[in-house]
Image: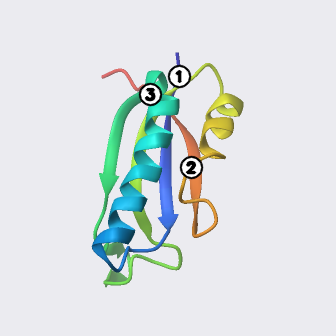
Amino acid sequence: MPHFLFAYHGGKQPETPAETEVEIERWQSWFDRIGPAIVDPGNPVGTAKTVSAEGVSDSGGDNPLSGYTIIHTESIDQAIELAKACPIIGDGSIEVAEIYEVSP
């Protein structure tokens, strides 16, 4: 079964402990619904450094990564359906990409 990367972009940081609790509950509820598909629930990420031929940028680019999850489903269409219910939608977005297995 193919694996897919959910690359989260954007979102918002909770500003109070109460907002943090609500956000954790929203994400946990979504993870509970997609649970059987999760390979690696992932984590949020900090500020990225972008490395290119021009050097190193501290910004993470125009649409910086804010977290990731790895899932497995039968198709990218099924992965997209799971992504549509993610709590980040509305304040951010998700890139869905198939992870190709490369044999050594």
Taking depth in this image into account, of 51 and 71 the one nearest to the observer is 71
The crowd level at tag 3 (other Cα within 10 Å; few <14, some 14-19, many 20+) is: few
Q: Are marks 3 and 2 in contact (CB under 8 Å)?
A: no
Q: Report helix, strand or loop for mark 2.
A: loop
Residue receiving disc 2 = 86
Taking depth in this image into account, of 84 and 8 the one nearest to the observer is 84
Q: Nearer the viewer, mark 1 or mark 2?
A: 2
At x 63% / y 46%, what residue is drawn?
85
Asked where in the image residue 60 lies, by quadrant, the reply is bottom left
Furthest toward the front, the residue is 18
Q: CA distance from mark 3 to mark 2?
A: 13 Å
At x 46% / y 21%, what residue is drawn?
36
Q: Position of residue 15 (x, y in %)?
A: 35, 80
Taking depth in this image into account, of 63 and 82 the one nearest to the observer is 82
Three-letter code for the amino acid on which mark 2 is drawn = Cys
Q: Report helix, strand or loop for mark 3.
A: helix
Residue receiving disc 1 = 2
Q: Report helix, strand or loop for mark 1.
A: loop
Q: CA distance from mark 1 to mark 2?
A: 20 Å
Q: Earlier in the sequence, mark 1 or mark 3?
A: 1
Q: Position of residue 100 (x, y in %)?
A: 48, 30
Q: CA distance from mark 1 to mark 3?
A: 16 Å
Three-letter code for the amino acid on which mark 1 is drawn = Pro
Residue receiving disc 3 = 35
Q: Position of residue 69 (x, y in %)?
A: 41, 43
Q: Is residue 46 above or below residue 103?
A: below
The crowd level at tag 2 (other Cα within 10 Å; few <14, some 14-19, many 20+) is: some
The crowd level at tag 1 (other Cα within 10 Å; few <14, some 14-19, many 20+) is: some
